Image: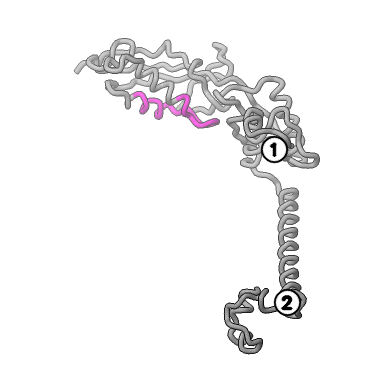
Amino acid sequence: MAEAFMQDTNLAIKYGFEVGADFNNTFSKVSIESLLLYIVAVGIWTLEKLFDTHTAEVTDYIATMKPHSLRWYVEKAKAFLYGVPLVDGSDQHDTTGMTDEQIAQAQIVTFAACTESNATLYLKVAKAGPAPLTADEKAAFVAYLHEIKDAGVRIDVISEQGDYLKLDMVIYYDPLLINADGESKAKRAPAIEQAIKDYIENIPFNGEFRKNELEDAIRAVDGVVMVEFVAAYHSETGAEDTYDEVVPYCKPASGYFKFDNADLSDVTYQPYAN
């Protein structure tokens, strides 16, 4: 404001100073001009602070009153800090005195997905791996949700071992490139098994297993000529009488599949002959 005052040509003529001169060298700190600029500056600063306070109050009100989306619950699940208390009356953890490393170690939920059915939210969560929460971790997580969730919302937390798959297929291969065990002769590695593993482990959390996508992944292996996909079966527990055939896709109840659970005993290899 003082610089703008000193740049004004009309004021320079009236007061007799040079345009661009220093305000403090021209006017006393107790002059009318200095006091008027000070009063105006303080008034503007006060107004800005009032607007900031008002914005913060409106933001807090919206956060308090707005019903939260499924995505909000996912983000809050990932923000859970095991063993760290919440700030009283807040949905934020009190991380006072904690280092970034300690916060990262307490943030145990890596994967989360939220769906709604019959007026209930189903929140699937898992640690890195992925792997399920322990009983104590899950109990703490459920208590955390009860503190932050919207009133009246029912939430069912699911954190289980990965779902099971059984694959029944015949893979025809070029014997110049792949041996009878499905291994690449050039790389001397189980190329087909690795392709299956990569596909299963790269399914997004709570994503779908799709037979055609797995078939495409196998056919992309150098040396695979053709894939005869007989069937695929899915189970939540792995018990023999719980497998259902996948037609043509399925979603894991736990949110993820484990490759260790993928039964490849019915996957056979046949050399392709023209």
Query: Which mark, residue 139?
Result: none
User: Where is residue 243 drawn, in percent x and y?
Assistant: 53, 17
Q: On the image, numbered disc 1 is attached to which residue?
A: 119
What is the three-letter code of the residue carrying label 2? Ser
The crowd level at tag 1 (other Cα within 10 Å; few <14, some 14-19, many 20+) is few
Of residue 26 and residue 81, the one placed in the foreground of this image is 26
User: Where is residue 222 drawn, in percent x and y?
Assistant: 28, 23
Q: Quadrant of residue 108?
A: top right
Seen at 62% across and 30% down, the residue is: 101
Looking at this view, name the residue that lies furthest to the right: 88
Seen at 27% across and 21% down, the residue is: 223
Q: On the image, numbered disc 2 is attached to which residue?
A: 28
The crowd level at tag 2 (other Cα within 10 Å; few <14, some 14-19, many 20+) is few
User: Where is residue 177 drawn, in percent x and y?
Assistant: 25, 17
SS at circle 2 = loop
Q: Quadrant of residue 198?
A: top left
Q: Does residue 166 appear left or right of residue 159 in this picture?
A: left
What is the three-letter code of the residue carrying label 1? Ala
Q: Quadrant of the C terminus?
A: top left
Does the residue at mark 1 contact the one at mark 2 (Cβ under 8 Å)? no
